[in-house]
Amino acid sequence: MFLRNAEPWMDGSTLGEHLEESGVSRRSFLEFCTEMAVILGLGSAAAPSVAKALEAQKRPTVIWLEMQECTGCVESVLRTEAPTIGDLVLDVVSLDYSETLMAAAGHAVEKAKADSMAKNKGGYVLIVTGSVPTKEDGIYCMVAGRTIREHLEEAAEGAAAIIALGACAHWGSVQAARPNPTGAVGVRDIIKNKPIINIAGCPPIGDVVTASVVHFLTFGRLPSTDREGRPLFAYGNRIHDDCPRRAHYDAGQYVENFDDDAARRGWCLYQMGCKGPATYSPCPIVQWNNRTSWPIGAGHPCIGCTEPYFWDTMTPFYRRLPEVGGFGVEERVDTIGASLAIGAAAGVLTHAGMTVLHQIRRRKSMKQVPEHEHPATEESHNG
Amino acid sequence: MTTGKPRPPVRPSWFDTKLPRARGDITWIYLWGAPLRFSHWLSAVTLLILFVTGLFISFPMWVTAGEASSHFLMGRFRFIHYTAAAFLVFGGIIRVYWMFAGNQFERWPALWPFTRTNLRHALTMLKSYATLNADIQPHFVGHNPLAQGAYTTIYVLTTIMIFTGFAMYGQSNPGGFFYTMFGWVPSLLGGLQHVRLLHHSIAWFYPIFFCIHIYLAIRSDYLERAGVVSSMLTGGRFVASHEKFEDCDLGDQPAVPWHTGEHPVWVKEP
């Protein structure tokens, strides 16, 4: 669509020249810039600035490291709406290394990576998907005979910025969930001296990645982030506050079973354990796969995959609150709390009854003081 | 009021027949300042509202029918919850002020009575409750250390509730005041779900505390006849002149009969 007959983008030529050579119309380029400006929260009025900055851009280099992961993030980015994957990864940015997408293999590609890193030292963008295993010296993830940690440290050395793509790359995701057998950690736990942006999600939305790269190319720096390192343009709002089912939440209309009438009517999934109230993500707005749908739109509660350590903190996915263990059987906090409260009430009533009985017995055993021996006032209350 | 016929004597009920009359001088002392009493009852009402509305928010047991546009059930419950929370915090601010302006029983050092002697007294109180033996109870003008420990615990728990509550409240307006001020809470607890769980778990302490607190206050009134329950309304309690207290020496407090209206005001530790 965007770069139908793409020519290879040669070193030294700007993006503007490259697009012209490839026969891309000015119009479609500006459409792309407008869309990116909108996603970035700059507003469509910023499109000319984005276009100006982008077309003057020299060919950027991207190294994509895939570590301990499932490749789902790559799949997600491949479905970026505009530009299409061929345009984005193979042309707009020059992907010099990516295990999943590159055609070459073996020693040749390792050499190409080393050459590219040496040549563009300090200037390339490092995209990282997957987590880094740290136990047993990191032998759980090896590429080309070396641990992925060595690859990461080597690649990060000359990177201008690191894009940690997906939940694994920042928090370790499922591999780092308790008991974390491989000692999986995110990139930020290994690399401390580089700007890292956290494109959270399992997987993240492809358009967010594209927009972040465009932001980097336009402004020469990564977009501003929240305290979890996620770009604010995408992760600035809770799903709950942008949710099209929010009216049902406020009205008190909830799905209680996946096959009930409320589910068919598209009511709120709060009771089904939806983590929308605790999750920051652009899912309701940007949606997935060319705006086809998104989890809550499809009737499934949000599992909170853009939040820290979501496999530990957001589970169980179909319950609102985390489980409380420690009794052998998993008990819900309400069961424990209500039992304790009822126990306290019962205990108090028992104690009260016993106190009264005890007191009556005690008083019966007392000797009554005759009225004339009593030194108190003359009022005769209480016998 | 009446003339002529002599009035009949009071006929005691069957279980009070052998109750001895109080001996000696009874004095009414002013103990709890108005700000403390105000914040106490404000907390009582708001905490009750907060617990009930909080239960609904966590588990909406009623589902409305028809169009969403004609209902606002959860919205109203949340509004009441947040409003009650605001009033609770208002009362809390007054209580904190009174921790510095109140008398020795209300000031902040009184919240922390955990000296060796006081721990012993607390243990004796527990023993007294367990054996139903009121005679071994140590006497205090203010709270006994066991009660004070419970109140201090509730203060601490309520502070946690306020912080976790505001942390969740702030989420609806990212970058806003509450989001920024309480942003460290989810980070500290490891995510919003843990904030939610903590807030939800602590909520169950309140009905438990309500039961025990109200029971023990009434029980103490029943056994000691010192007017403990009404002290939270009138501010004062009765003391017998011969009674010895662990937390302070009433010393030469004049034994003024309480009904004369000349209430000695207890201000400072001698």
Image (cartoon, coloured by chain):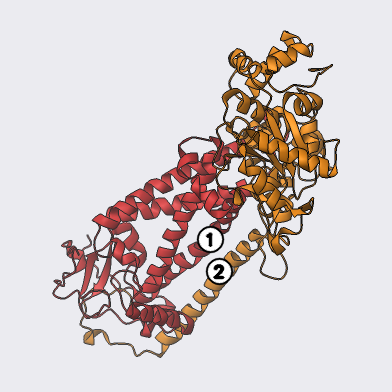
Chain colours: A orange, B red
Image mark for residue A344: 2
Label 2 Cα crowd, 10 Å radius (few <14 / some 14-19 / many 20+): some
How far apart are the two marked residues, 1 and 2, measured between alpha carbons? 9 Å
Residue A62 located left or right of residue A356: right
Q: Is residue A194 above or below residue B212?
A: above
Q: Is residue A297 visible?
A: no
Q: Is residue B67 above or below residue A149?
A: above
Query: Label 1 is placed on what type of residue?
Result: Pro
Query: Which picture quadrant has residue A108?
Result: top right
Question: Are the residues flagged by discs 1 and 2 in contact, CB closer than 8 Å?
Answer: yes
| Chain letter belonging to callout 2 | A
Q: Is disc 2 on the same chain as disc 1?
A: no
Task: Identify which residue, A297 or A62, lies in the foreground.
Answer: A62
Query: Label 2 is placed on what type of residue?
Result: Ala
Q: Is residue A169 visible?
A: yes
- Return the residue at label 1: B207
Query: Which picture quadrant has residue A48?
Result: top right
| Chain letter belonging to callout 1 | B
Residue A164 located left or right of residue A22: left
Label 1 Cα crowd, 10 Å radius (few <14 / some 14-19 / many 20+): many
Task: Label 2, secondary structure: give it.
Answer: helix
Residue B112: x %, y % from top left: 34, 68
Residue B253: x %, y % from top left: 15, 72
Residue B142: x %, y % from top left: 30, 69
Task: Identify which residue, A127 or B244, lies in the foreground.
Answer: A127
Q: Is residue A310 above or below residue B211?
A: above
Q: Which quarter of the image is occupied by the N terminus of chain A?
A: top right
Task: Identify which residue, B192 or A52, lies in the foreground.
Answer: A52
Q: Is residue B149 above or below residue B70?
A: below
Q: Residue at x 78, y 23 (%)?
A: A87
